[in-house]
Amino acid sequence: MNRLTELYRLMRRIRAFEDAAEIASQGGVAAWGLAAAAKPALVRGPLHLSTGQEAVAAGVCLNLVREDLLTSTHRGHGHTLAKGADPTKMMCELFGRASGYNKGKGGSMHIADFSVGMLGANGVVAAGIPIATGAAHALKIRKQPHIVACFFGDGAANRGPFLEGLNWAQVFKLPILFVCEDNRISATTPTGPMTAGEGVSARAQALAIPSIKVDGNDVEAVDAASKQLTAEIRAGGGPRFLHAVTYRFKGHVSVDPGTYRDPVEVAAALKLDPLIVARGKLLKQGISATAIDAIDTEAKDEIERALAVAEAAPWPDVASAYEDILDTGAGVWQ
Amino acid sequence: MSTMSYAQAACLALQEVMRADANVVALGEDLGRGGVFGQYRGLPQEFGPERIIDTPISEANIMGAAVGMALAGLRPVVEMRVIDFALCAMDEIINQAAKNRYMFGGQGRVPLVARMPIGIWSASAAQHSQSLEAWFAHMPGLVVVTPATPQDNYGLLKSSLASGDPVIYMEHKELWGVEGEVTAGVEVPLGKANVLCEGSDLTIVTWSRGVGVALEALSTKAFKGIRPEIIDLRTLWPWDRDAVFKSVAKTGRLLVVHEAVQVAGFGAEVAASAAEATGCKVRRLGSPRIPVGYAQVLENEARLSPAKIVAAAEALLKQ
């Protein structure tokens, strides 16, 4: 399989997973003036979709190996899949089942697969940054030849841990790739008018962290920049920064219709769908439409099977509410 | 057995653990010079800057990095300098360190010890004098330790480092120079109280700096014929319910003493639990709900004293 086909396939799997989760979440959360459905949705909690942003997850993570580590955001399904997690165990977690990655204790917002180095989505903006720097610090102290990819959004650049973490990574010359997945909106507020100066790359450069800005909807561009930056980090160059500009197709959460955005802006952005862009390039490379359609079908079928497994999966045992907390003093809850 | 200070005892404990386990590191501000209270003295020379890590003034990142380090195989000791500064790292403590194991379904653990010195010390006023143990005792996912003596600071620090859990470790700043006998190798288990003296009239439960003040009241015969049983709780979560309930079953009266603000303090939890379990009479002694003031007369209002403990004990005996 050529590189672009591999990237496309990964993006398509992410899209299929999130499209299915989105449908399964309708009515799950009472928000934006909508009531929760009478019958509980299969995905009950907030579901933050990265639909439209898949090129960033795919383009970065295809440059990582299993032993590399990754921290993510509340919008983390794509990063998790791209790092190698099993979509069935992910879907089970979104459905709150015992066979999910977190035994039904985390849901979408805390999706994680530590076994592939994916150290967790996070419900707090910018909270992954200090954790990622610590993980990178540990890799350096333990002389392990791996790196950390730290994903965060454009909103995170306005929180304190962004400065603390970037400064720390540079002071200790840590093996970490900071990835600002810039979808240009902080929850429901455009990030631009909320952000002073020349943008996140300028902030990284102020700390002398080399930075590359790319079209985050062009998976080949993300891949090429990530290839260069990860190679520099692996060579001992210290931290690097990738600013990938993309667009969030959906609302802040799946039940948010996103009506606060200019429909003209949304329509224009949809035309730059990273999957459409990549498909066009594949056709130009001589890959047949039939072959590409087969990739799409394969991704959908995989997620259909995940949905079926998740819906039939058992709920957590109530006793598990008292497990995985502390060993010290376990058994006393009052 | 040798005589050493509360700070030296912690140093010895950390030195022993760092010699035995290459994955133990310490990180925080000013550690390269042995820490602002000398509680890391000598360790930078022995273990070097890679394991005794001097950090920027970045409390959020210090604590968050420790979480990441723990997930990636290290066993970090975090120095927050004073607990007041740990407030700059509350997301990292509460939402990250305390929640990680549970919300990720047990995929990882966060073995770290976060040292956050508490208490009134050297006219340090409102932002360097707080005792916030109740905040952390409230929080599922954290162990809370409050050593009162050099031996306990040695033994509890070793037990905390061995526990594999996120531990909030609160040394009291006024105790750093206090000297006592320390027997190396004696580990003090977490969750076990220390009955310091037996008595039949009432039970006094206290911890940290409160222990010394209660013992001072006893040694100066300030109790005037009252025979208290004095218990050092040592660990606030998990706390030794059995030891406290056993004592109050005998005395029928419980006075809880702490330097922290009395309102919603951990003393309320101990008193309510003991009353529920045994029907004993209870009383609390803590600071009034005022910030700690700078001038001595103002600071004294927030301080414990033997006289305040005796007055509270006498009031309890009249209940």
Image (cartoon, coloured by chain):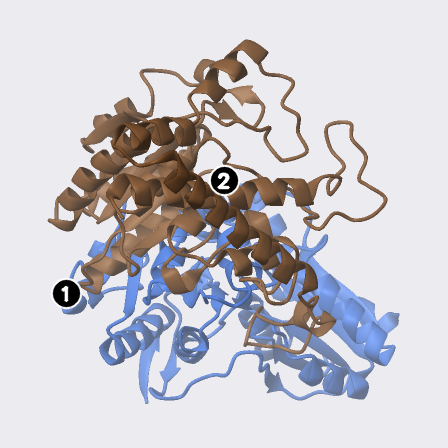
- What is chain B's hue in the picture? blue
**B160 left or right, relative to B134:** left
Chain A: what color?
brown
Amino acid type indicated by mark 1: Gln
Query: Foreground: B115 or B261?
Result: B115
The residue at the point 36 percent across, 36 percent down is A56
Q: Residue at x 55, y 42 (%)?
A: A18
Name the side, left or right, on which A259 lies relative to A327.
right
Considering depth in this image, is B303 or B284 the residue closer to the camera?
Answer: B284
Q: Are marks 2 and 1 in contact (CB under 8 Å)?
A: no
The part of the image, by quadrant, that contains residue A207 is: top left
Residue A191 visible at all: no
Q: Quadrant of the C terminus of chain A?
A: bottom right
The residue beneath circle 2 is A15
- Residue B270 x, y percent position in the rendering: 72, 69
Question: What is the chain letter for disc 1?
Answer: B
A185 relative position to A46: left or right: left
Above or below — where is B51 with respect to B292? below
Q: Which residue is located at x 48 percent, y 63 percent? A: B170
Name the spot of residue B65 as percent of width and height, x first.
Answer: 36, 52
Residue A323 visible, this angle: yes
Establish if B248 lies above or below A46: below
Q: Secondary structure at mark 1?
A: helix
Disc nearest the viewer among 2 and 1 = 2
In percent of width and height, residue A327 lies at 54, 76
Q: Do badges 2 and 1 share one subunit?
A: no
Callout 2 crowding tier (Cα within 10 Å): few <14, some 14–19, many ≥20: many
Three-letter amino acid code of the residue under disc 2: Arg
Percent coordinates x, y for residue A132 in the rendering = 35, 49
The residue depicted at 74 percent of the width and 87 percent of the height is B246
- The residue that label 1 is drawn on is B45
* Disc 1 packing (10 Å; few <14; some 14–19; many ≥20): few
